[in-house]
Image (tube, rainbow, N blue to C red):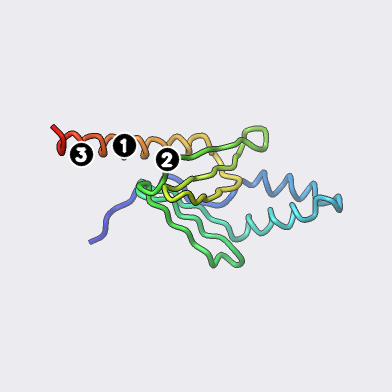
Amino acid sequence: MGISEEVYYEGGPHIGDLIINVLLGFTVVCLPLTVGAIVRAIWLRYRITSRRISVTGGWMGRDRSDIIYREVYKIVSVPRGLGAWGDMVVTLTDGSRLELRSVPKFREVEKYINDHLKVKDKNKDKAAETVNP
């Protein structure tokens, strides 16, 4: 019997990132950006649940990173595509970082993750109060 997880978001990067980069690909200068957007659209997948953040990517989708909320120190996001999608950087407690590029509904996803971080902080405070009355 495993621990149940509620899936909040599961899918790939925003389609607008691919469309804009393909249009920019008609110029030779932006061709590397276009290739990157195509690779992201094909093999990059995000899964954000009530317990963890999972990112599957890399060449042919062979790399996978799973982060539980207990390991997250902070999260920062930057809007792109006129605010329709955005990039997020998740900083872990050990100082390493995980980038999530072209996340659809990134503001809602950031709020969801921050809410889970706040729940984690509240649980720490309650545990500290019971240890040190």
Q: Which mark is residue 127?
A: 3
Residue type of the residue flagged with mark 2: Ile
Residue 123 vs 41, above or below: the answer is above
Q: Which mark is residue 12?
A: none
Question: Regarding mark 3 in the picture, which secondary structure is present there?
Answer: helix
Closer mark to the observer between disc 1 and disc 2:
1
Inter-mark Cα distance, 3 to 2: 21 Å
Residue located 26% across and 59% down the image: 2
State which quarter of the image contains the C terminus: top left
- What percent of the width, then of the height, locates residue 55? 50, 55
As rendered, which of 113 and 10 lies closer to the eye? 113
- Identify the residue at horizontal 67%, vertical 43% (top origin): 16
Name the kind of residue labelled 1 in the image: Asp
The x, y position of residue 125, in whole percent, is 25, 34
Q: CA distance from mark 3 to mark 1?
A: 10 Å
Q: Earlier in the sequence, mark 1 or mark 2?
A: 2
Question: 98 or 52: nearer the eye?
Answer: 98
Height in image: 92 above or below 83? below
Question: SS for tag 1?
Answer: helix
Extreme-front residue of the structure:
132
User: Dot 1 corresponds to which residue?
Assistant: 121
Look at discs 3 and 2 and give the one toward the viewer. 3
Identified at 21% across, 35% down, the residue is 126
Rendering coords of residue 84 (x, y %): 62, 36
**Front residue (pair 120, 95):** 95
Q: In the rendered view, does 121 fall on the left or right side of 57?
A: left
Q: Quadrant of the N terminus?
A: bottom left
> Could you tell me how many numbered marks the image carries?
3
Q: Label 2 belongs to which residue?
A: 113
Q: Amino acid at mark 3?
A: Ala
Residue appearing at x 62%, y 59% in the figure: 42
Mark 1 touching mark 2, by CB under 8 A?
Answer: no
